[in-house]
Image: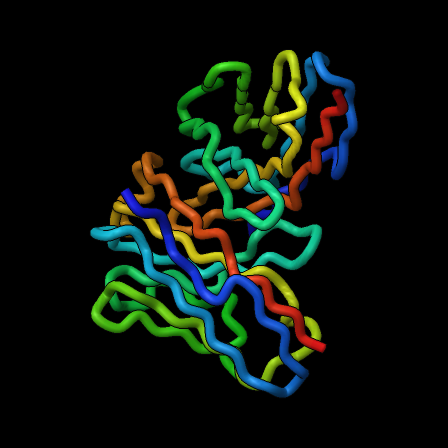
Amino acid sequence: KQEVTQIPAALSVPEGENLVLNCSFTDSAIYNLQWFRQDPGKGLTSLLLIQSSQREQTSGRLNASLDKSSGRSTLYIAASQPGDSATYLCAANAGNMLTFGGGTRLMVKP
Amino acid sequence: EAGVAQSPRYKIIEKRQSVAFWCNPISGHATLYWYQQILGQGPKLLIQFQNNGVVDDSQLPKDRFSAERLKGVDSTLKIQPAKLEDSAVYLCASSLLASIELYSGANVLTFGAGSRLTVL
């Protein structure tokens, strides 16, 4: 059974800092890994999807990497802004099911 | 394009009462999902439909939860009777691809805003 863990559970940083969110998964037989953003009272928004054959994906200030063999993914946020404050979730796709981590609550202070 | 619509947004009930949530996916999306998200945790899949058939309901507590997707469009999720531990946000999501195409890795789910349930 796939288990996905995210560390840290919460993070508070001053504006402008570069930061890294970590995601680990127990079963490396995944098709892809996705990072989502969740704002309070809102649904999930897909940020980046990394195929199992890829090492990383970039979108603007976001960069996600994937190391299947070690069961790890990281989300790098450059030059953080208060608008980045949200919960970030990773999800491993092992076929027809996404298994989510518990999320990292990010607060970026002005 | 309109997003995934869910209602009600909030519901407060007493334990042992029943509740129903409704989801209208994006037009043309073949696959529909219901997730349960308990406070502080990631979403957990309850049930997945492809058109009006069930693909996966292995994590649905069938003694109290039921779901249907008549005509392969809208879906309802019902809880009867509710327990305290059912307090959560119930998220509906839909995707364009049929479930088998999820193996291609290209599938992207669109989530609704969720229905927050509080059981007292």
* Colour pattern: rainbow
Query: How many numbered discs sit on the rendered protein?
Result: 0
Residue at the image point whose x is 70% and y is 32% from the top: A106
Q: Is residue B62 left or right of residue B116?
A: left
Rendering quarter of residue B34: bottom left
Which quadrant: the C terminus of chain A?
top right
Picture coordinates of residue A66, whole percent (x, y): 53, 24
Q: Is residue B70 above or below residue B25?
A: below
Please state which of residues A25 and A87 is positioned toward the viewer in this rendering.
A87
Q: Is residue A29 above or below residue B80?
A: above
Q: Is residue A44 left or right of residue B72?
A: right
Rendering quarter of residue A109: top right
Picture coordinates of residue A108, whole percent (x, y): 72, 25
Q: Is residue B65 above or below residue A10?
A: below
Picture coordinates of residue A8, whole percent (x, y): 75, 34
Picture coordinates of residue A42, whole percent (x, y): 54, 47
Q: Is residue A31 above or below residue B7?
A: above
Q: Is residue A92 left or right of residue A95?
A: right
Please state which of residues A29 and B17 is positioned toward the viewer in this rendering.
B17
Residue at the image point whose x is 44% and y is 52% from the top: B112
Residue at the image point whose x is 52% and y is 62% from the top: B9
Please state which of residues B80 and B3 is positioned toward the viewer in this rendering.
B3
Q: Residue furthest front?
A: A110
Residue at the image point whose x is 54% and y is 19% from the top: A62
